[in-house]
Image (cartoon, helix red, strand yellow):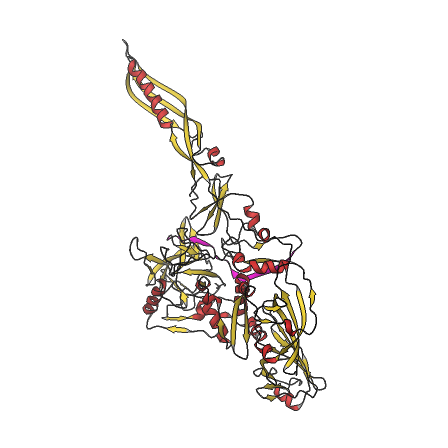
Amino acid sequence: MLKIKTNKGYLDLGGDFTVQIDEKSPVMNDRGSQTVPVTIPCTSNNAKIIGFAHRLDMGVKPMNEDQACTVLDGVYKRTGKINIVSAGKKEGVTLNIGFDNSEAYSAWKAKKLNAITLPVKEYSSVNSLCTHLQQVLGGYQADYAVFQIMTGNDSKDNQSYPKYLNYITPVSEGSNVYRLRYQTRTETFLINGTPTAVTLPEGYGVTAFLYVWRVLELVFSEFGYTITENPFKTDKQLYNLVILNNAADCCVKGKLSYADLMPDCTVDDFLNALYVRFGLVYNVSSDTKTATLRLIRDIVDDVPDIDLSRSLTDEPLITYETARQMKLSAKTSFTGAAPSVERFEDYLKDQEVARLAKVDIGKRVIHLNYEETTGRWFKWDEENKRLTYSSSSFFSWDRKSDNIEDNELTSDDECVPMDFAPNDILSPQYLTDYVHRYTYLKTSSNNDDEDSEKAETPLSFVFAFTSSQNSKYPFGSVLPYTSEGEEVVLKDGSKHTLSLLFQYKNGLFINFWKKYDAIIRHSFNQVEINAQLPVHQLMSMDILAPVALRGQYMLFDGLSYSLPANKIMPVELTLKTLRLIAPYNLDEEHFIKDFGSTLYIWKLVRNTMTEVIENKKKEILDSFNESENTILSSFFKTNTDDYMTPDSDNYVIENPPILDNDKLIRNYQVKLRVYIDYIMGGPEDLRQTYDETFILSYIGEFISVVYSG
């Protein structure tokens, strides 16, 4: 017998009451599981339970605090929440019941991440807290990381006024041990365009960055769920992912409030960002109060949980879906984050690339330069004849295959550029300014400038590398490279090879979305089946796992059944095919150019200008010495301003060598002006001046060498 139990008793359902339950896969949509709207009679018992929703004079939202209910039908038991759709004395009360994910989706949308119940760690003093964070900087395990970032990089009159969080310095010259700057001090900031000395209290400018795995635990525990599977905790690379913040004064009271470390976004924004970047989906159970978190790449690779072949009651109906392709992007509002074009393919084209740990923009090189440590691109400025910044690497993933619709996903987080800070530490450029909650700025001129709280804390991710084996110092980055351009080696000796870029061979598409993209391009057809399933199997079914049907692997899209039912109930299931259907060419569709070539430049190995000038000077002086003239003084002046030199020869830049050990000889000219005061030999000893200008030719000899920055 079907029953619906609430905190205030059982609802009156009527003799022929039935309810249809629709369950949707979180891989496909965010509807969750819920009943089709049903109507119950407006009895006095029901009216009392639902808060007299049919009355015009009600003063409190119907079922405001009593939405929880349990649907019971024999061995079937399901916990959910009631949502009132409409109510009338005559028409009855129309409602639906949301289960599991539908409850979570409703809660996520309105809840701010910094408004959930969060820990506060109290310390005996500010110094004690900062000493602890110093230990975390050095690799001590906590649920947060500490490393240097920049929140501002203002300048005026060629003077930089950077704003740091977790500013670090080596404990001694050449040391690999670094310390935080947290003592009471005075710093100069650019405030309203004016350099201003600011007195900073102990603990100012120090913060911590929460690991994503920990934030996920806090989010789900807020709503009563315990996580049973968390890839951000079990995957060695994803474990290091953290959320940035700009809380400049979060430590000045000797406590660490996790709310201060959270971004200004909703739980839904946070989870959506993890979905877009990594394909994170989840399924919660209101009955067991557990949450299962999985990545789509792992789901489509998993083995089937059940085989439905023998449960069919009819032949499947296949509906062929329109092919789609993934399109991935995120916000690029920070200075230096936006790429020059949307797609990497349109930027790179057929250009050859020099991959360097760090680009020296003083070099005269025509090659396209990629800086591995920061992900920045530099190209030759033809007009000004120098290397200039060209683009970031935050290109979208957008393959633009013909006649294929886009499955477009946009993340709610901001991409964070990388650069070397003025103290030469590789640092995320989280240029959001400082956020103050416990202090105001006190200038040396005694003007109090209270913080206006205008600064925000946008959602942004980086990897924390505080225990790597091969980095000179602890740091955070969106890329898998140390400040020397080496792949980060983690504490256990494995390499971190993942970046937070959508593009490139270490990027998010190739690591998390490649297989799913192939499926929605060349499969993912809808299969509708009717089956008879035992209630216990239906209740324990893992909707995130593939199922088998006549030897084929498929994903759940949704299922529907009605209550009351017997122990074996009819179920309508909608599945999605996973097996790729020919023709397809994944090598072409997923091709990512492995840019970075062995490129050459001309290196000057011989310049005969000095030799030619000295020979000319000697020739002139010898001529005088061989005569009867007496030299009183001599002066030689060279001038190359009006002539091309090996350093200014654009031909050498614009025609780089293509072979090793190649040679090039170029001809140049230099102007030599000669002043000689002398006495002409003879009876009258006349004083004369020799003033001549010569145009001398010399050569520059070059050999080809590998360009290494």
- At x 34%, y 66%, the residue is 130
In the image, residue 606 above or below residue 495: above
For this orientation, the residue located farthest to the top is 683
For this orientation, the residue located farthest to the bottom is 44
Q: Position of residue 630 (x, y in %)?
A: 27, 16
Q: Nearer the viewer, residue 191 or 586?
A: 586
In the image, residue 281 above or below residue 386: below
- Magenta: predominant secondary structure element? strand
Pick the quarter of the image with the C terminus.
top left
Is residue 215 rendered magenta in the image? Answer: no
Q: State which quadrant residue 26 falls in.
A: bottom right
Q: Position of residue 250 (x, y in %)?
A: 40, 67
- At x 69%, y 74%, the residue is 313
In the image, residue 20 above or below residue 293: below
Q: Is residue 274 left or right of residue 363?
A: right
Q: How many numbered callouts?
A: 0
Q: Nearer the viewer, residue 6 or 545?
A: 545
Q: Position of residue 462 (x, y in %)?
A: 46, 60
Q: Position of residue 563 (x, y in %)?
A: 65, 82
Is residue 407 rendered magenta in the image? Answer: yes
Residue 406 visible in the shown view: no
Pick the quarter of the image with the N terminus.
bottom right
- At x 38%, y 30%, the residue is 606
Q: Nearer the viewer, residue 132 or 110?
A: 132
What span is colored magenta in the figure? 404-423
Residue 464 visible in the shown view: yes
